[in-house]
Image (cartoon, helix red, strand yellow):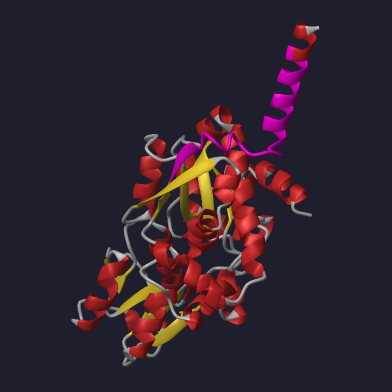
Amino acid sequence: MKKLMAVFLLCVSLFLIQSGSVALAADNLVKVKMAQPGQDNYGIPIYLADKLGYFADEGLEVEFVNFKSSPLSVAAMLAGDVQFTLTSYDQALKMYEKGRVLKNLLTTTAKHPWAILARPEIKTVPELKGKTISAKMPGSGPRAFVSTILIHYGLDPDKDVTFAALPGSAIIPSYENKAIDATFGSGQIKAELLSRGAKILVDMNDPKQHREILGTDTYPQKVIVTTEEYIKAHPEVVQHFVNAVLRAMKWEETQDSAKIAELTAPYLLGQQDEAIIADIRKSFSHDGVITPEGHEAIDKITLDVGLISSPIPMDKVVDQSFLKKALEQNK
């Protein structure tokens, strides 16, 4: 009888772990690290999952680790120093071509979130020729985005402009001392530059520009990614992580921007203005789903800017099985 009971309990435990339907042990939280390229506005759903206690509900304790750019965040994850990364979708494409399999688990953005802003005397993108643009490191999402815009308007990003790889905290001072002429940006940086007279040349929050330049209405720019090895070794942790973030996405959708600003202030560079948060939220995803159209758009752009040499099928870099289970639980 005792053996039968033991077998029964083991089967139940395995089922619950596989389904991800219950939290890990609440009295012994599993510690994981989440890498991010600075304090990222598009990590707000993840910050809310932490602030609202959803990670703890799922038996997780999450430590956020800041890096200068996405390539550095991904390198730390590949080294095993962090388990999850908030990064741009194209990082998984690049790594796959190098023989390292990363899986995009869900997207925090349903649309591309960024804008390009320039000095007020610069009226159009072609006028950026010969100018210096802040766009983080080579191989990063921001560099790919700015390169895509330049190519769309007939400029060669390798010859016609100079790039400056600045951390977020250096962009405003560099603009003020005229070390840069333009930058990609959103949120606080976008608002501060506009207050200093900068001009928006391109804004992906404009649906018309989004479709004209990117060729799609959906674009999973920001994603939560982990390694294929970690998924195989710790599927239950991955499931509970995804459960918590999706729950936060659903909560965020129903709240006003003032509340979001208040709760996320400790995770960002202080509390941001309600209007800034409202602008940021225009691109948010509330179901985390990565669409085939979004994948195809990013795959094409990543190919066009030379970050990959051939198209990569969606199933090679995406695993939405955990998201599917989480969505079923949140019906």
**First to last magenta residue range:** 6-33
Q: Quadrant of the N terminus?
A: top right
**Nearer to the camera, 221 or 245:** 245
**Vertical position of residue 296 compared to residue 187: above or below:** above
Place of residue 119 in the rendered image (x, y in percent of width and height, measured from the top left): 31, 87
The answer to whether residue 311 shows anywhere in this view is no
**Vertical position of residue 145 compared to residue 190: above or below:** above
**Vertical position of residue 132 compared to residue 312: above or below:** below
Q: Is residue 284 magenta?
A: no
Place of residue 93 in the rendered image (x, y in percent of width and height, measured from the top left): 50, 47
Give me the residue at 63% from left, 40% from top: 239
**Nearer to the camera, 27 or 300:** 27
Place of residue 45 in the rendered image (x, y in percent of width and height, measured from the top left): 55, 60
- Residue 219 position by quadrant: bottom right
**Nearer to the camera, 162 or 66:** 66
Q: Is residue 13 magenta?
A: yes
Give me the residue at 45% from left, 76% from top: 115
- Left or right: residue 183 versus residue 10 is left
**Nearer to the camera, 99 or 284:** 284
Q: How many marks?
A: 0
Place of residue 112 in the rendered image (x, y in percent of width and height, measured from the top left): 54, 68
The answer to whether residue 73 shows anywhere in this view is yes
- Residue 195 position by quadrant: bottom left
**Vertical position of residue 251 compared to residue 101: above or below:** below
Give me the residue at 72% from left, 46% from top: 324
- Left or right: residue 158 versus residue 309 is left
Q: Quadrant of the C terminus?
A: bottom right
- Left or right: residue 293 versus residue 328 is left
